[in-house]
Image (tube, rainbow, N blue to C red):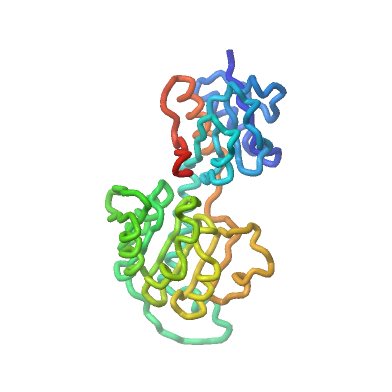
Amino acid sequence: MPVNVFFAAGPEHWPDYRIPLQNALAATGVDAVLADRAEDPAAVDYIVYSPGGIIADFTPFTRCKAVLNLWAGVEKIVGNATLTQPLCRMVDPAMTESMVEWVVGHALRHHLGMDRDIRSPAPHWDQISPPIARERPVAMLGMGALGQACAQALAALNFPVTGWSRTAKEVPGIPCLHGEAGLEAVLRQAQIVVTLLPRTAETENLLDARRLGWLPRGAFIINPGRGPLIDDDALLAALDAGQIAHATLDVFRVEPLPPDHSFWAHSGVTVTPHVAASTKPVTAAGVVAENIRRAEAGEPLLYLVDRARGY
């Protein structure tokens, strides 16, 4: 009997995912029926989901064995009281590659002082030589799959990278600290800070006025993680005071970023429209299909969300 897979990530994504999901499921050998509607919710075996999709109440899906999220973040679903099924987040290898490229690109941009030449409105000949990479310490806040990949890519360019996470981590080639004392130690020596933490109650406003004050004067902030990781007002004050030289932000508390937000007009802020990394249908479909294969074979699910931690 085939398993029923309900694509509930929204009609706008269905054309991009239909064929990749069908191909990926066929490649695993799973006998599956894929549909973008559920005539009988009680007959659905798996739900492919994304925030803003077409399900808010998971109660009718009594046979569902897992909800498979297409995005890395699960903060918009993890607190849903009707969601009693196992929830898996997305770890897409192509999305990881995109994030590495974006983070490395902006880290090098700030390290080399490229804005000084690109944005100059008039002829100039300021022969300012930047330090070499091994003289520019980087703090990677968040050592999950994305943080580890970005940390290792920067380390391969000779940046001295130190990782930080809320709990202890061991990552080959990257020294890692954790806890409040570890956060202070990491920030006090970092000239570039990259934030790739999930949004939880513990990480909201992680970079507040006090912690921004721990950084060496003139540090750079790069945030492709979650908007609420940084206190907006504290960041603007730190930029105005020269404590932070520049902030490149890809994520925000409200998206799209409202036209009247101070970030748009501030010379010390670069806004990018949440483009650092997105799920790629072909590779993401492979992850979804593999999890369905695992569940049908009685094997552990990949990237299972810990509800207590929120990720």
Give the residue displayed 45% in from the left and 38% down from the top: 306
Identify the residue shown where x is 52% and y is 32%.
288
Query: Residue 220: x percent and y percent?
Result: 44, 70
**On screen, residue 158 above or below 122:** above
Residue lying farthest to the top in this orientation: 1
In the figure, is residue 227 to the left or right of 14? Answer: left
Q: In which quadrant will I find the N terminus?
A: top right
In the image, taking residue 167 as reference, residue 6 lies left or right, namely right
State whether residue 170 is above or below residue 288. Answer: below
In this rendering, the answer to whether 260 lies above or below 14 is below
Residue, x 59% and y 30% (percent of image)?
47
Residue farthest front in this picture: 81
Is 13 left or right of 217, judged from the image as shown?
right
- Is any part of residue 294 visible from this angle? yes
- Nearer to us in this view, 187 or 104: 187
Answer yes or no: is residue 15 visible: no
Q: Residue at horizontal 34%, vertical 55%?
A: 179
Quadrant of the rendered image containing residue 108: bottom left
Q: Where is residue 242 in the image (x, y as percent from the top left)?
A: 46, 80
Q: Is residue 74 above or below residue 64?
A: below
| Total tally of numbered discs in the picture | 0
Residue 258 lies left or right of residue 130; in this view the side is right
Image location (x, y in percent) of residue 158: 31, 62
Image spot of residue 3 (x, y percent): 58, 19
